[in-house]
Image: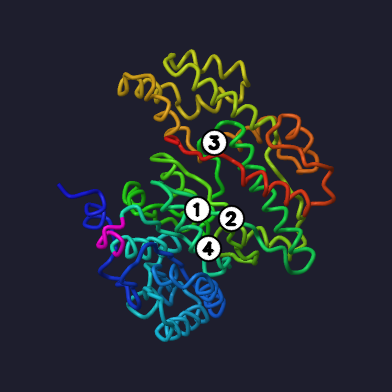
Amino acid sequence: MHDPITRYLNKRALLERWPLRGAVPDGVRQAVVIPALAEHPGLFDTLSDLDAGPPDWRARTLVVVVVNNRPPAQAAPETIENNRVTLNRLRDTPGVAWIDAASPGCELPPKEGVGLARKLGLDAALRELHFRGRVDAPLICLDADTRTAPDYLESIAAFFTARRRWAAVVDYAHPLEGAPAQRDAIMAYECYLRCHELALAWAGSPYAFCALGSAIACTARAYAAVSGMNRRLAGEDFYFLQQLAKTGSIERITTTTVRPAARVSARTPFGTGPRMAQSGNGETTQCLVHHPRAYAVLRAWLRIAARHVAASAGTLLDAASEVDAALAAFLERDRFAALWEKLQVQERHAARLLPQFHAWFDGLRSIRLLHYLRDHGYPDQDLTEALPEYLTLRMFPAPPRKPDGRRELLRHLRECCRHLPPTGTRG
């Protein structure tokens, strides 16, 4: 019987239409995959960052750039031209491999985007690692507009060679640059991300991580186990990490930091780019976060499930209604009772029911619950308004002194996130 990686490569990998070209190190020990859509010249600053670290680890790292765009009917002429320049320059760049998903006849299909671009590079890198027997070597996701420190490659390599791992998120920090409105917008957005991650951890969610496409790494073994990168046009990083969390432990690499660009972009409907766009059109840069008590409802529900995993669906729903009527209504709308009864028939061992519960009540469903609660009595709040209750509930440690502005609070939230434990349903 074929091993899981061979099965994946044979059945799910996309390798023939978009071949890997350029330099593949003989002694490759890890791979970095960078999708690039009109990223000239900034991409080459990122590549220079990778070259700035220890030469031995750079020589053992396969770097794959996936230059991509859709056909001319769906891609702007300037995007196509930018990618043409990028491809020409990559051909003269030593130590880099690339995939051409941009030239005539090689473009991504009309309805595809960053998810497929990441998948092409990761699939190609997986094949190279597997061929060399490096099934526990890391596949690393990076973005073309993200800067890295000189210790980036070495730190990730050390993390994955120290012991057997599954997946990890790399520490990140958006550069606080640009005009005051831009700095304020990115600080507001990152404060939201940090608060959400810390509050999910406090609630006991196994999906307490920040999903940034430029800060994900997993082993070749883990990549194949979750059927590879999905092909979503947006949120591909979130869904990929969610699948990794359902199958293993998500740890944190805090010995290095990536710095994703805080730039205006309309490529995806949510995330950094749209948030930054608000800073230039007069919209508020208010730091809105989920209501602290919404996370308290989530925490109570996850504890009910953990403590009464052998109970009937009716018992769990009764307990949920005692926490909050909106929680019970949400669960009834999502047909929890039928799901729970089905799981109990399929899985007779109570100890194994909890991972099955978390596979259903996953990161996406947790966010949907928070949104439902937002619309049913727990409206979003400005962080300044919510912070006292966050601290009263001990969702994260209080700063040593009252923060002097958003920048100082963000610095504190970053440090709190660095100390969060591993997560995942099997962590």
Under circle 4, the secondary element is helix
Q: Marks 4 and 3: which is nearer the front?
A: 4
| Cα–Cα span, label 1 and label 4 | 24 Å
Mark 1, Cα crowd under 10 Å, few <14 / some 14-19 / many 20+, is some
| Cα–Cα span, label 4 and label 2 | 27 Å
Residue 99 location (% of width, % of height): 36, 73
Front-most of residues 113 and 402: 402
Which residue has dot 2 on it? 270
Taking 319 as reference, is 154 above or below it?
below
The residue at 59%/36% (across/down) is: 201
Residue 289 location (% of width, % of height): 70, 43
Residue 366: mark = 3
Residue 317 location (% of width, % of height): 51, 18
Please state which amino acid type lies under the numbered disc 4: Tyr
Q: Are marks 1 and 2 in contact (CB under 8 Å)?
A: yes
Which residue has dot 4 on it? 152
| Image quadrant where one finds the C terminus | top left
Please state which amino acid type lies under the numbered disc 3: Ser
Residue 259's image quarter? bottom right
Q: Are marks 4 and 3 in contact (CB under 8 Å)?
A: no
First along the sequence among labels 1 and 3 = 1
